[in-house]
Image (tube, rainbow, N blue to C red):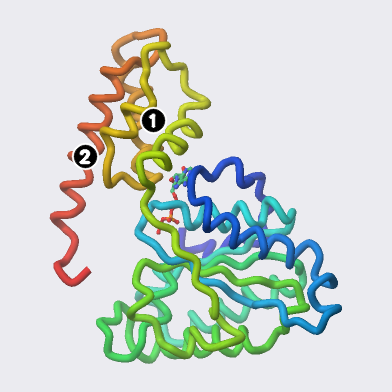
Amino acid sequence: SKAQLFDKGTKVNITFNDVAGLDEAKVEVMEIVDFLKNPKKYTNLGGKIPKGALLVGPPGTGKTLLAKAVAGEAQVPFFSLSGSDFVEMFVGVGASRVRDLFKQAREKAPCIIFIDEIDAIGRARGKNAIMSNDERESTLNQLLVEMDGFSGESGIIVLAATNRPDVLDSALLRPGRFDRQISIDKPDVKGREAIFKVHLKPIKVSEHVDIHKLAEQTPGFAGADIANVCNEAALIAARKGKEAVDMSDFQDAVDRVIGGLEKKNKIISPDE
Ligand code: ATP
């Protein structure tokens, strides 16, 4: 809702176990967990702890999930805000939200700040901005001011997600800001199998369900689509009064999710 524009330092219970696949990305963010847990280990040798990292990848691939898992693993509060929340705000409101967010984060550090869809705020001038230029610029400027206003030792790490790194204002990518990029790709067949396993945990499945086959039948699916398939399959089976979800329910669910994805693709504008 618009009233609550960001998570105010919520405690999260998500860990790396909840994030399937993404092995390389996990290795990179494990370093961030260590920065949060043992900052002295790094600063003692004169190193500067990075302040921000950009998670780059298509929608639904687990960027938010991974950011939450970093907070969960390091046992620090999680603050978040989405670039799309700023669309159609009055000039100055975005900047004051950003200021407010960092103020609260400083009080609760060490912590993670997660900015989803940072491209909505951080687009370079003239690149098809979805909010007015004045508003976008004042929000972006405030973010840059905040990023420059704390040091790596303060225990705040800002993770931001985007699927359009190409449109970002280069000011965001300078050293001391989002100078690391971690790519979060759509899962391959092994990754999809691992994601199915995570999302099948709470579901009663019949013994004939072949997870490997499901992974093979879902090329191009992001983690969010797989989570969706598992849930749909459970609902389809329940509606039929079954005791457990079987392969045919999963197949119906896959078809349904593919139908949904096709519809979504039709309404996406050609330049996206
Ligand atoms: P967006 O860019 O649309 O915000 P995102 O990359 O942040 O997407 P998430 O919001 O993290 O994606 O993913 C949505 C949901 O999909 C997760 O809450 C989780 O249920 C599931 N999911 C996505 N990726 C994975 C994964 N690698 N392992 C397990 N579950 C996943």
Q: Where is residue 6 drawn, in percent x and y?
A: 56, 64
In percent of the image, x 65 and y 58: which residue is there? 30
Indicate the amino acid at tag 1.
Answer: Asn
Q: Classify the position of the C terminus by image quarter.
A: bottom left
The image quarter containing residue 158 is bottom right
In percent of the image, x 57 and y 58: which residue is there? 67
185 sits to left or right of 106: left
Task: Estimate how packed mark 1 is, as few (under 14), some (14 to 19) or many (20 or more) residues with alpha carbons within 10 Å.
Answer: some
**SS of the residue at dot 2?**
helix
**SS of the residue at dot 1?**
helix
Q: Is residue 199 above or below residue 234?
A: below
> Which comes sooner in the sequence, label 1 or label 2?
1
Q: In this orientation, which residue lies closer to the viewer: 98 or 29?
A: 29
Q: In this orientation, which residue lies closer to the viewer: 85 or 63?
A: 63
The image quarter containing residue 51 is bottom right
Q: Which mark is residue 258?
A: 2
Q: Which mark is residue 231?
A: 1
Mark 2 residue's CB less than 8 Å from ligand 1: no
